[in-house]
Image (tube, grey):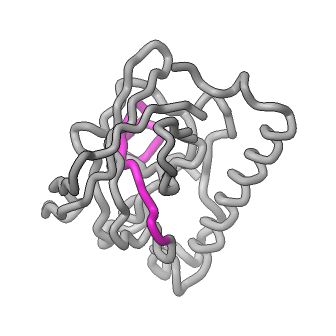
């Protein structure tokens, strides 16, 4: 499977760019608001926005969704060293830069990063940028609950840091072994320290 950049019209590219910029603006607003921010008072006082890679539709990728046949729960390691059971929605299969990739997708189950979003799915993942220019603990890729179509679009421009990247006292999910990509996803949110 190839990326979708060549299938987008100028109008679609413009609309998607605006949607990504809007999502980033909303996250900055959430970060600035003391009632919703994961930042402590000291960090909040100096907060001037998050840092992102430029929008690049090379990282908008078509994937095949293989739904879990039964209600399957997987124990995922949390940043506090404990595990938590997450319901697995399925597996996503795709190709990027000649590498065959697979990622598990889970229900968010009230994670604070997705507060207020019903039926939100997320993909915890690491890639070759993790610990270098992106958060060492991995990132999350949000995914809306798809319809019955097996084709899903993954837009890594929407990749975000878990709250643990900003505040170590907040417990976040570490990606499982099935969330380790052997490619560089130079897209989405950068390390908080690099803003």
Is residue 161 shown left or right of residue 186?
A: left
Q: What's the residue at 52%, 39% (across, down)?
A: 152
| Residue at 39 percent of width and 36 percent of height | 92
Q: Nearer the viewer, residue 56 or 131?
A: 56
> Residue at point 47% right, 47% down?
148
Q: Position of residue 94 (x, y in %)?
A: 44, 27
Q: Residue at x 50, y 51 (%)?
A: 146
Q: Is residue 36 left or right of residue 171?
A: right
Q: Quadrant of residue 181?
A: top left
Q: Is residue 133 magenta?
A: yes
**Position in image of residue 36 (x %, y %):** 52, 80
Vertical relation: 88 (above or below) 172: above
Out of 187 and 134, give the one closest to the viewer: 187
Q: Position of residue 142 (x, y in %)?
A: 49, 54
Residue 85 appears in the picture as rendered: yes
Main secondary-structure element of the magenta-colored stretch: loop
Q: Is residue 21 above or below residue 186?
A: below
Reply above or below: 45 against 109. Answer: below
Looking at the image, the residue that sits furthest to the top is: 98
Query: Is residue 92 covered in magenta?
Result: no
Q: Residue furthest front?
A: 148
Q: Residue furthest right?
A: 11
Whether residue 31 sits left or right of residue 132 in the image: it is right
Count the numbered circles shown: 0
> Which percent across, then down, holds residue 34?
55, 84
Q: Is residue 76 visible?
A: no
Between residue 140 and residue 89, name the one nearer to us.
89
Q: Which residues are magenta?
A: 118-135
């Amino acid at each position: 499977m190839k990326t979708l950049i060549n299938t987008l019209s100028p109008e679609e590219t413009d609309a998607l760019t605006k949607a990504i910029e809007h999502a980033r603006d909303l996250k900055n607003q959430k970060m600035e608001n003391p009632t919703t921010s994961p930042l402590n008072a000291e960090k909040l006082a100096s907060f001037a926005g998050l840092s992102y890679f430029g929008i690049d539709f090379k990282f908008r990728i078509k994937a095949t969704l293989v739904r879990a046949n039964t209600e399957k729960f997987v124990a995922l390691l949390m940043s506090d060293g404990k595990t938590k059971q997450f319901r697995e929605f399925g597996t996503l299969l795709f190709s990027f830069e000649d590498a065959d990739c697979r990622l598990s997708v889970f229900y968010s189950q009230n994670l604070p990063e997705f507060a207020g979003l019903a039926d939100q799915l997320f993909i915890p993942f690491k890639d070759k940028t993790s610990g270098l220019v992106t958060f060492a603990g991995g990132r999350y890729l949000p995914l809306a609950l798809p319809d019955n179509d097996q084709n899903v679009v993954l837009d890594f421009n929407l990749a975000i840091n878990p709250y643990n990247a900003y505040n170590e006292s907040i417990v976040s999910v570490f990606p499982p072994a099935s969330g380790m990509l052997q490619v560089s996803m130079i897209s989405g949110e950068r390390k908080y320290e690099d803003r």
